[in-house]
Image: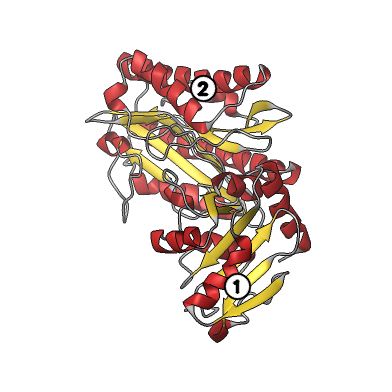
Amino acid sequence: MDPLELGGIREAIRRENLDGWLFCNFQHRDTLADAVLRIGGGESNSRLWFYAVPALGEPVKLVHAVEAGILDGLAGTKAIYVSREDLRAALKPLGGKRWAVHSSDSLTAVSFLDAGTAAFLEKAGLVLVSAASLIQRFRGLLDAAGIASHERAVDQLYGIVDLAWDRVQRAYAGARPLYEGDLRDLMLEEMDRRGLVTGHPPIAAAGANSGNPHYGFTGRGGRIRRGDVIQLDLWAREKAPAAVYGDIAWAGVFSGEAPAETERRFADLVSAREGAFRFIGTELAAGRNVSGAMVDRETRKMLTALGYGEALKHRTGHGIDTECHGSGVNMDSVEFPDSRLLLEGACFSLEPGVYFPGFGLRTEIDVYIAQGKPVVSGKNHSRQFKLLTCRS
C-alpha cells in the first residue's frame, strides 16, 4: 500500500474519532478489504488474517503461519499465530479500543464481517463499530481531479442521450420500426467511440417495461409502439483507473405530444428532484448536517403529498465514485437507511421515480458537494426539466 493511502486511512480514522480501522478476511469474502489494501484475489486466503491500522502508531499484521506472507506488502509489525489461543493472545493489545470494522445493520454493501468473527473479537475485548463512515471518507469523496473526471463523463452521457433521442424522433417521423435494442446498442457504441466504459449495458425500456427500474433484455428487446413511454438510463466513466462515473436518466414518449397526465407526473417528479436539491442547499447553508436518509425522507414526503406513495419502488439516489454505485452516502431512508453525512466531495444521484402498471418514469441528475454547496453535474442538465417528445 502506498504511504499516502495509509495516511488517508489514518486521516479518516481521526476525523471519525475512532481508535483504528480493523481489516480482516477469509477466502477473500471481504472484497472491500482486498480493494482498500490492494490484496490480489489470487493470493491464498484459507486462513483468517487481520490488519489493524491505529489512528496513531504502527499498524499490526496478524497472519497464520501457513500464509505468513499474505500481508507482506503492507506496512507494520507482523505477529504469526497457529492456534485460536495464539490469535486471542495477539488480539489482546487491541482490546478496550474502538475499532471500525466492515459491518453494518443497515448498509449491506459494506457489511462483510461474519457474526462469529465479530463475537470472537468482542470476547477478546475489542469494541466494534461500523466502518461505513470511514469507507465514505477514504473511497467515496471526490477531489478536484475526480470531480473533473465525473463532469466530463456526465457531459458525454448527455451528448449520447441527444443522439439516442434523435434516433427516436427519426423513427417516429419516418414511421419506421424501432426496438429497445436499437437504442441500447446505439448508446453502447457511442460510449465506446467516446472512450467510455460501463459495468453494465444502459437501460432502454419502452411501454410497460419502463415500469421496471432494472429492466434488461437479450436480442433486440421489445418493439417501441406509438404512445409508449421510453425510459433511458445510462452510466459510464473514462477508461483511466481513477476515473469517476456519470449516471443520468431521462424519459420521453414515442409521440409528437405527451398525454397531459404523463406530462403532469413527470413535472411532479422534477419538482421533487429539485426540491431535494434545494433541501440539501438550504440545510448546508444554515450550517446543519444533512444525511442521505434525510434527503430521501424529504423527497418521499413531497411525492407522497402529491399522491405517489404507492408508486415509489426505490430510494432517491446512490453514491458515485469510481464505481457507479459507489462507497459514499446513498439517498436512502427505507431500503438501506444511510445516516452518513453529505461531506465535502460527496457525489451522488438524485433519481426519484414513480411506477405504474402500464409504465414508469424516472429522472436522474448527479450532484456533488463543493465548497459546502450542492452542484449539479453537467453543462446540459438545465434541459432536463421537460419530458422528451417526437415533435419536429
Secondary element at image label 2: helix
Point out which mark residue 204 bears. none
Point out the frontmost of discs 1 and 2.
1
Q: Residue, x 77% and y 58% (percent of image)?
A: 4
Of all residues, the one furthest to the bottom in this rendering is 66
- For the residue carrying disc 1, how many other residues have a C-alpha within 10 Å: few (<14), some (14-19), or many (20+)? many
Nearer-N-terminus badge (1/2): 1
> Is the residue 353 above or below the residue 347 in the image?
above
Residue 93: percent from left, percent from top: 63, 64
- For the point 35% across and 13% down, the residue is 305
The disc placed on residue 276 is: 2
Residue 197 appears in the rendering = no
Pick the front one: 41 or 179: 41
Give the residue drawn at x 41%, y 25%. Answer: 389
Identity of the amino acid at label 1?
Leu
- Residue 105 placement (x, y as % from top left): 42, 45
56 or 284, nearer to the observer: 56
Q: Amino acid at mark 2?
A: Ala
- Specify few, some or many for label 2: CA neighbours under 10 Å numbering under 14, 14-19, or 20 or more: many
| Residue at which label 1 appears | 62
Looking at the rendered structure, the secondary structure element under dot 1 is strand
Q: Is residue 54 above or below residue 293?
A: below
